[in-house]
């Protein structure tokens, strides 16, 4: 992909770094990143990841608004922990979504790795949704996903993107630590 992939990777790194720091500007930089990755993933025949970028643009618009006004009394949103209900429901949704999307891609496209691509895509949507809600555990899920994505992108010869996901892996660990501190500080202040 050349220049487009490198520019997309740069916007992605900036977006995640801003997310780690809980800066609302992470969302518009994410939109640019996602638009560019539609082109990159189409070229790599990773159609689930390509479609995911469209979903991410919608999620980014929601996250942008929610981080600004989703807190109590339409104020800034604070970091929270995942509920027991979500912890029980999300793996079931991930499995069902992966099976459905993987089957669709395997039967109707020339997707390179339909099941893996679908599983990573569905779990990424879950992680991103958790991020829009400022749920601390989004970062732990991103760590696991980033490890798998690095392998996928190396396999598909998307080396700048693999490098980006290595950066994402480090940023996800940093994000978890920073958001955990933020969560503890807010709880202590109450």
Image (spheres, rainbow, N blue to C red):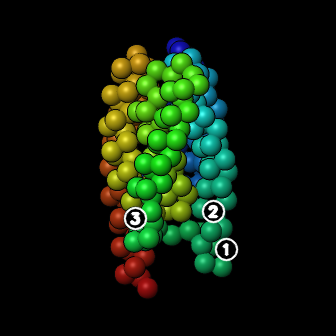
- Going by the picture, which residue comes out furthest to the bottom? 190
Task: Determine the image quadrant of residue 153.
Answer: top left
Marks 3 and 1, how far apart at CA: 26 Å
Residue 10 visible in the snapshot: no
Question: Looking at the picture, does residue 97 appear above or below residue 186?
Answer: above
Residue 28 horizontal/vertical position (percent):
64, 45
Q: Which mark is residue 74?
A: 1
Q: Which mark is residue 66?
A: 2
| Residue tagged 3 | 87
Image point (52%, 41%), residue name? 100
Task: Report if the CB atoms under discs 2 and 3 are less than 8 Å apart.
Answer: no
In primary-sequence order, the first of circles 3 and 1 is 1
Q: Nearer the viewer, residue 125 or 97?
A: 97
Question: Looking at the picture, does residue 93 appear above or below residue 115?
Answer: below
Image point (39%, 71%), residue name? 84
Which numbered disc, 2 or 3, marks the residue closer to the eye? 3
């Amino acid at each position: 992909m050349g220049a487009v992939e490198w520019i997309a990777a740069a916007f992605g790194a900036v977006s995640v770094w801003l997310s780690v720091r809980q800066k609302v500007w992470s969302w518009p930089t994410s939109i640019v990143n996602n638009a560019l990755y539609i082109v990159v993933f189409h070229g790599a025949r990773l159609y689930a990841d390509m479609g995911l970028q469209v979903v991410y643009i919608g999620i980014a618009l929601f996250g942008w608004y929610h981080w600004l006004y989703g807190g109590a009394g339409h104020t800034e949103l604070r970091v929270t922990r995942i509920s027991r209900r979500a912890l029980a429901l999300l793996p079931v949704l991930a499995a069902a979504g992966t099976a459905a999307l993987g089957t669709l891609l395997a039967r109707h496209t020339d997707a390179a790795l339909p099941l893996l691509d679908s599983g990573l895509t569905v779990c990424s949507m879950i992680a991103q949704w958790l991020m829009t809600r400022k749920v601390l555990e989004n970062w732990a899920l991103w760590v696991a996903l980033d490890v798998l994505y690095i392998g996928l992108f190396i396999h598909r010869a998307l080396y700048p993107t693999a490098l980006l996901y290595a950066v994402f892996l480090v940023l996800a660990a940093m994000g978890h630590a920073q958001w955990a501190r933020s969560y503890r500080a807010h709880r202590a202040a109450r």
